[in-house]
Amino acid sequence: MALLSVLQWAAQERITPQAANKRIRVHGIPRHDGKIDPDEAKRVFNATVDIRQQERGTTAKRVEPVATGGANRRAVHMGTSSAAGRRPEIQTAIDAVKLQERQLELKRKQGKVVDCDEVRSVVSAMISAARNRLLIIPDELCDKLAATADPVRCREMVETRIHQALSELSELEELETVS
């Protein structure tokens, strides 16, 4: 076939001149003195086309004759009510979910994400340990406090024992973090 200008080739392919230039640039369609060989352009385009990219955002098309019954044909957009028409959308959604799963697994392996049940069990254990340590204080101090008549001294004894229990808890927490 004879060489065509970009505008002529665009008209033959029924695409805009901008789309024709993009095809030339993206797919590497060769030019010969600024002109295009349509057969070579079709072969190169079909060899390098990305089907998923081509289907993205387009609706299915059906070619029907014009009402006059002439040889001219026109493209009529059909709705995407069938699953086949929604295939690109479905595949895109599936790909997005798979990507999110991979990213979550990577973060889990890097230690940036922890399972909620693990966090709950660790927090529950820490609360139980704190509760147990603090509830023992009255039993430990009751005889000493009863024997002491000075209220300031009683307060100091209670504060000292509470600070001691809290520091034991913080040391326990540091040991669990290291291991």
Image: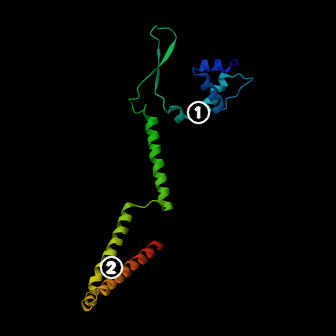
Q: Which color mode does the image show?
A: rainbow
Looking at the picture, does residue 71 appear above or below residue 160? Answer: above
Callout 2 touching callout 1 (CB < 8 Å): no
Give x and y (percent) for residue 118: 38, 65
| Residue found 38% across the figure and 82% down from its top | 164
Q: Nearer the viewer, residue 176 or 27?
A: 176
- Disc assigned to residue 49: 1
Ranked by sequence position, the earlier of labels 2 and 1 is 1
Give x and y (percent) for residue 63: 48, 19
Asked which quadrant contains residue 172, the reply is: bottom left
Q: How far is the residue under mark 2 from the one under mark 1?
A: 70 Å
Q: Is residue 126 left or right of residue 7?
A: left
Q: Amino acid at mark 2?
A: Arg
| Residue found 52% across the figure and 36% down from its top | 52
Q: Amino acid at mark 1?
A: Val
Q: Is residue 114 visible?
A: yes
The extreme left residue here reads 146
Asked which quadrant contains residue 31, the reply is: top right
| Residue found 33% across the figure and 85% down from its top | 157
| Residue found 40% across the figure and 26% down from its top | 79
Crowding at mark 1 (Cα within 10 Å: few <14, some 14-19, many 20+): few
Q: Is residue 27 left or right of residue 128?
A: right
Q: Which residue is mark 2?
A: 133
Give the mark toward the camera: 2 or 1: 2
Give x and y (percent) for residue 51: 54, 34
Q: Secondary structure at mark 1?
A: loop
Q: Nearer the viewer, residue 18 or 83?
A: 18
